[in-house]
Amino acid sequence: MARTFKKYYRIPATPEEIYLALTTASTISLWTGEPAVMSAEVGTEFSLWDGSISGINLEFEPNKKIVQQWYFGEQNESSIVTIKLHTDKAGTSVELVHTNIPDEYYDNITEGWTESYFADLLEFYEE
């Protein structure tokens, strides 16, 4: 059984800044503090937090949208992450939808999105 997680995050930076922070390996390393492999090219593989998250990049719409497939071992259906960036009075409203998260990873992944991924990004822009 797989589940979907959807949440909005507000970040005090422009959609352009957020897009670069999510698609540029050197910037990802800055805000995560860990090695990252990333390229804003469709079909390229990525790796975040020194390999604890990996997958393939499926779609890019500069400054608006990122679509990735995340790997979870042997899985029949792809686990898809869609991040949409919307201009907001506070900077950017980030819309996250993560589909087909395997049950055994659900709590860990949803906690990770809020307490690591977006918390680290938020901290990066608040400093």
Image (tube, rainbow, N blue to C red):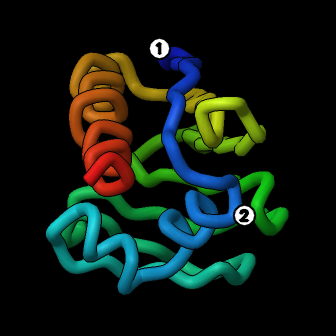
Pinpoint residue 79: horizontal percent, then vertical percent. Answer: 56, 40
Q: Residues within 10 Å of mark 1 (few under 14, many from 20)?
A: few
Quarter residue 109 falls in:
top left
Task: Name the residue nearer the viewer: 99 or 28.
Answer: 28
Quadrant, the C terminus: bottom left
| Residue 73 visible within the image | no
Residue 10, given in percent of the width and then of the height, sits at: 53, 30
CB contact under 8 Å: marks 1 and 2:
no
Residue drawn at the location 56% of the way across and 28% of the way down: 100
Q: Residue at x 23, y 30 (%)?
A: 115
Residue type (three-letter) at the residue carrying disc 2: Leu
Q: Give 58 or 121, whichever is nearer the viewer.
A: 121
Q: Residues within 10 Å of mark 2 (few under 14, many from 20)?
A: some
Residue 59 x %, y %: 78, 63
Q: Is residue 15 left or right of residue 107?
A: right
> Is 83 positioned to the left or the right of 113 in the image?
right
The image quarter in which residue 36 lies: bottom left
Residue for badge 1: 1
Q: Which mark is residue 58?
A: 2
Q: Quadrant of residue 104?
A: top left
